[in-house]
Amino acid sequence: MNKSSYLFLAVILSLGSMILAQERPFPVFKGPYLGQTPPGSIPEKFAPGFISIFGYDFVPTFSPALDEVFWGHRPTEEGSDNKLYYSRMVNGRWEKPVLAPFSSGAMEYEAQLAVDGKTLYFTRDGDLYLSRKTETGWSEARVLDPPVTKGMCPAVAANGNLYFTAARNKVYGIFCSRFADGSYQEPEIAIRMAAHSWIAPDESFMVFDKYIFNNGVQTSKLYVSFRRSDETWGDPIDLGRDVNVNGTELIAKISPDGKYLFFQRKVDGDTDIYWVDAKIVHDLK
């Protein structure tokens, strides 16, 4: 076989592989939480091949009915090509993930559904945005009005109070903007030097992460803080060695039914999503 014949054969094989890849059906994921076996007290990787894929995965947020999910992803940890993805469960089976309906092509990440599942908050290029669910689908996103335009990782309590990470007036941490008279009030610092909060619907506790330096190396751990009777926040409590394994744990969220804690962890250069029984959080109170 001459050189041109080898080249022709290589092209045919390559085209054949592409066609087979296009025709390969998407794997079946059925039921609540993508049909994954619920974890116990030891975290397990969540939904390999769907949510946890190679690259940098952001923690998912599920609808109250557990039939819609948004999450973020970028191809590499070092990159900034963050995109939000969306899937819904139809007749018990989850559809193949697609870009979020309101995707703009900009850097978008850290999605969080409101308690009622009708509003999705997320970050776009350093600003806080929202999209509302309508009869025809999810609306075009709009930026939040001042004084809560700038920030990241939004989380909203049942009463509408907004928690987010920001640096304001030379103070870095998790801020809270109370929702009153139909608008957000001037944000106040809730927990200093912390980030990526998830707030309980009744604001009784908050999970978040904090960066620390160990021998010159930056690491991160997950914590919980419980709200005191005087409405201040208690000292951060480490979520424990079963969760904080290697200092790469970030961005925790608790499922809408309160049963599971989701978070990021990097293993062998790949950042995936893990989940664990949320009892480990409640037992720390």
Image (cartoon, rainbow, N blue to C red):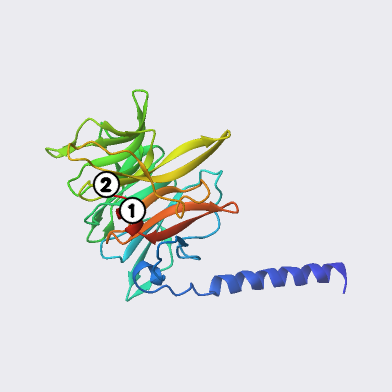
Q: Amino acid at mark 1?
A: Val
- Position of residue 278 relative to residue 35, above or below, is above
Using the rendered view, name the quadrant where residue 125 is placed.
Answer: top left
In the shown orientation, is residue 128 left or right of residue 219?
left
Say which element carries label 1: helix
Query: Helix, strand or loop at disc 2?
Result: strand
- Name the spot of residue 166 as percent of width and height, x first: 36, 33
Q: Where residue 284 appears, x then y in whole percent?
A: 32, 51
Where the N terminus falls, by quadrant?
Answer: bottom right
Picture quadrant where residue 234 is located: top left
Q: Are marks 1 and 2 in contact (CB under 8 Å)?
A: yes
Mark yes or no: residue 72 visible: no
Which residue lies under the disc numbered 2? Answer: 205
Residue drawn at (71%, 72%) of the image: 12
Q: Residue at x 72, y 68 (%)?
A: 11
Q: Is residue 281 above or below residue 88?
A: above
Numbered badge on residue 281: 1
How far from the left and from the top, in percent, is residue 246? 53, 49
Q: Could you tell whether 1 is left or right of 221 in the image?
A: right
